């Protein structure tokens, strides 16, 4: 009887862990291919919740990668001025807007800003993250515990590498790539 109970608990744990893991996988569709992202709600629960809310409601669809710096990161997520599908789209203002939701308090974690890590973009105020995020092309240890990392690309980083790069220094992109969609897997 004890073996049966043990097996049931083991089976239940495996099934629920798999369901939980599936709920934290996202598919980012780019022109170049699909990117699979794993989110870390145990590390940055509020940032993950916001990202999933905006993604699953279609707010990121059509949003441009307005700042892309070779060897550093690709920034996107300005759902106000950076969404090429909206009447408020203004490439010169992309990167200055956010969503209608309140800003998020920082959730600094032990997640290192390595290649493929997703992190919340913000102003100089650590508690100003809203909808914008970036994906690291390379390790950026100077960002560790300064920005709220909340996920990582686990498949398709080669497609992220193909995103059009911006001007040296500023990273401004004159003819930017855009997110086709991001949804929970």
Image (cartoon, rainbow, N blue to C red):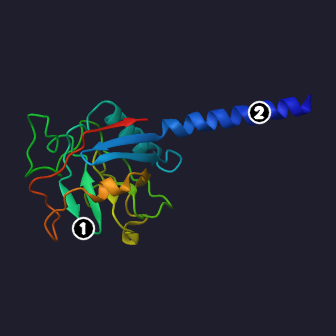
x and y, in percent, of residue 29 in the image = 30, 42
Q: Are marks 2 and 1 in contact (CB under 8 Å)?
A: no
Which mark is on residue 9? 2
Q: Is residue 106 above or below residue 113?
A: above
Residue drawn at (41%, 35%), measured in percent from left and top?
184
- Whether residue 17 is visible: yes
Q: Is residue 76 above or below residue 26?
A: below
Q: Quick one: SS at disc 2?
A: helix
Residue drawn at (81%, 33%), measured in percent from left and top?
7
The CA span between labels 2 and 1 is: 48 Å
Q: Quick one: SS at disc 1?
A: loop
Mark 2 is surrounded, within 10 Å at the Cα level, by few (under 14), some (14 to 19) or many (20 or more) other residues, namely: few
Q: Which residue is mark 1?
A: 70
- Whether residue 126 is visible: no
The quarter in which the C terminus is drawn is: top left
Q: How many marks?
A: 2
């Amino acid at each position: 009887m004890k073996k049966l109970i043990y097996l049931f608990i083991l089976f239940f744990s495996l099934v629920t862990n798999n369901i939980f893991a599936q709920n934290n996988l996202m598919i980012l569709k780019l022109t170049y291919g699909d990117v699979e992202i794993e989110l870390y709600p145990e590390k940055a629960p509020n940032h993950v919740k916001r990202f999933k809310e905006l993604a699953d409601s279609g707010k990121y669809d059509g949003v441009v990668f307005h700042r892309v710096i070779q060897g550093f990161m690709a920034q996107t997520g300005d759902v106000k001025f950076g969404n090429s599908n909206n009447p408020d789209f203004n490439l010169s203002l992309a990167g200055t807007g956010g969503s209608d939701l309140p800003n998020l308090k920082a959730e600094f974690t032990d997640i290192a800003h390595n290649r493929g890590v997703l992190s919340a973009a913000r102003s100089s105020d650590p508690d100003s993250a809203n909808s914008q995020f970036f994906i690291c092309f390379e390790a950026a240890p100077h960002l560790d515990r300064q920005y709220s990392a909340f996920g990582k690309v686990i498949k398709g980083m080669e497609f992220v590498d193909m995103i059009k790069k911006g001007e040296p220094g500023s990273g401004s992109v004159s003819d930017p790539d855009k997110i086709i969609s991001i949804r929970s897997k």
